Image: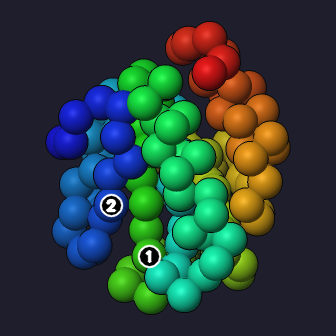
Amino acid sequence: MAEEGQVISCHTLESWNQQLQLANESKKLVVVDFTASWCGPCRAIAPVLAEIAKKLPTVIFLKVDVDELVTVAQDLAIEAMPTFIFLKEGKIVDKVVGANKEQLQDKIGLHSSDLVQKA
């Protein structure tokens, strides 16, 4: 697993499954950023997510390119980019659609509040 405080990119189904299994076992909040290389708002929010990840090492941040892992995006019904899915122990607990920094921070704070203080 990558170091804490980073956004971990999953480029293969194998790496996605491995990261998800490790995350589920850790019982930590997982924030998955579904993105696309051609998506302007995705590129705009990426540095914000990286900054949040640095501040919250007890939250696991994963990044999935919908064009690389089409089946993962389809399985989770991703219809727009960016979409952020929040998982706890493998279950979806929330999501944010769009590059909304405030809403993203609020949801991370809400779902990680039992783990850490809001960034």
As rendered, which of 72 and 110 lies closer to the eye? 110
Q: Are marks 1 and 2 in contact (CB under 8 Å)?
A: yes
Q: Is residue 68 visible?
A: yes
- Up/down of 9 relative to 109, above or below: below
User: Badge 1, how many Cα within 10 Å: few under 14, some, many 20+?
Assistant: many
- Which residue is pictured at 54% across the width and 14% down the height? 115
Q: Is residue 18 above or below residue 14?
A: above
Say which residue appears at 64% left-offset and 78% top-offset: 40
Give the amino acid at mark 2. Answer: Ser
Is any atom of residue 70 visible in this view?
A: no
Question: In which image quadrant can residue 117 be found?
Answer: top right
Q: Residue 110: where, in percent of width, then height?
A: 74, 26
According to the image, label 1 marks what residue?
A: 65
Mark 1 or mark 2, earlier in chain: 2
Residue 8: which disc? Answer: none
Work out whether residue 92 or residue 6 is closer to the camera in this orientation and state it: 6
Residue displayed at 69% across by 25% down: 109
Residue occupying image coordinates x 70% and y 81%: 79
Instruction: For the C terminus, give its image quadrant.
Output: top right
Label 1: which secondary element: strand
Near mark 2 (Cα within 10 A), the count class, few <14, some 14-19 or many ≥20, is some
Question: The residue tagged with tag 2: helix, strand or loop?
Answer: strand
Q: CA distance from mark 1 to mark 2?
A: 8 Å
47 vs 23: above or below: below
Amino acid type, callout 1: Asp
Where's residue 11, x and y in %? 28, 73
Task: Identify the residue position indicated by label 2 in the image.
Answer: 9
Give residue 31's position: percent from left, percent from top. 53, 46
